[in-house]
Amino acid sequence: MRIAACRLRFPRRALQISVEMNPFLKKMGYGPEDRVLITHIDDMGFCHAANQASLQCLTEGSATCASILVNAPWFQEAAMMSAAHPELDLGVHLTLTAEYPTFRWPALSTRDPASGLLDASGYLWATREDAIRHVKVDAAEAEMRAQIDRALEAGIDVTHIDTHMGSVVHPKFLARYLGLAAEYQIPAFLPRITRDRLESLGEGEMAEGYLEILEMVQQEKNPTLDDILIETMVPLNEKSAFYKNLISKVAPGLTHLLFHPAVDGEELAAIADTHASRHADFVAFSDQRLRDFALAQGIHLIGYRELKEQLRAGD
């Protein structure tokens, strides 16, 4: 299938995607009024500070799962943490980008500039737009496969795949991304957004490719997300109230809330200008207060392992 080369953006707020009962949740035994929440760590493996924070949030805190940047410099430490804690719910944070000016990572699959994967310095592209413009579809699939295989070879029980900076869920690459999820029999981060909702956001024409593929997904057999809370990198020194507000507004269906915890210090500050927000995420999710708050609201907390188990159980 030929996919239109369009740009799909999600709005800078919680994006409510669908009002229908999620067919995959129905198969899992949930009802139409049940609110099911995934509290998801992005960017594990990114640096030592992110690994430290991620491990605490997963083992002692309010995170249910995480995804790992396999290409990033501190992947091996994340893999060691996984080996020491096989109960962790960990996926692969598929990446075609390396956005930090002084902290870069290359492709795993090739060093061939003809692939379109690499910038002039030999690293993955710094922006999502450049990755979408330059990376060839076959090369993107090979790179995504290499990242999944690297995680599996390291002994990680990969529970899902998702996207770093949104690049691999662009319509240009979406069919290959979902094809890999089917091949490896793992869930993929996939919002089930509607045409009406996209048109109301002014994204109707550019979203044709995304919708074309989404219409082919058997949603009773493959998990899709009713709501995504993705714009959480906000400049707040204390974020518990921010997250309680988001959690209190979770609607019926399956919601994916992502955050980026890391322990602040010289390492993190030298890499990312978002270091204060990442540390605030760590503080907010490092203990079970947010978990307890969600449960008190009547919200069901799950990770991607539950979705993977249901996916593999079949009919």
Image (cartoon, rainbow, N blue to C red):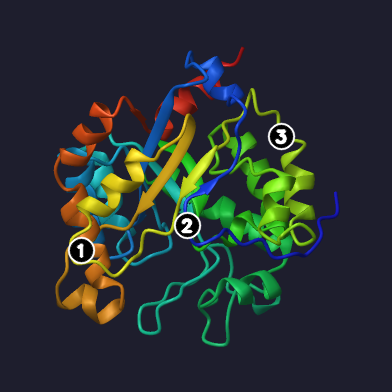
Q: Residue at x 75, y 44 (%)?
A: 213
Which element carries disc 1, helix, strand or loop? helix
Q: Residue at x 67, y 48 (%)?
A: 197
Of labels 2 and 1, earlier in sequence is 2
User: Residue type at mark 2?
Assistant: Arg
Residue 36, placed above or below residue 171: above
Q: Where's the C terminus, which quadrant?
A: top right
Instruction: Tell me whether the residue at label 3 lies in contact with that at label 2, contact meaning CB atoms closer than 8 angstroms.
Output: no
Characterize the local packing of mark 3: few (<14), some (14-19) or many (20 or more) Cα atoms within 10 angstroms: some
Is 262 in front, or is 82? 262
Check residue 13 in the rendering and tell me which mark sits there, or answer none: 2
Which element carries disc 3, helix, strand or loop? loop
* Residue named by callout 3: 217
Residue 273 picture location, percent across and down:
30, 78
Residue 247 picture location, percent across and down:
33, 41
**In screen coordinates, is 253 left or right of 302?**
right
Which element carries disc 2, helix, strand or loop? loop
**In screen coordinates, is 243 left or right of 303?**
left
Is 284 in front, or is 98? 284
User: Residue type at mark 3?
Assistant: Val
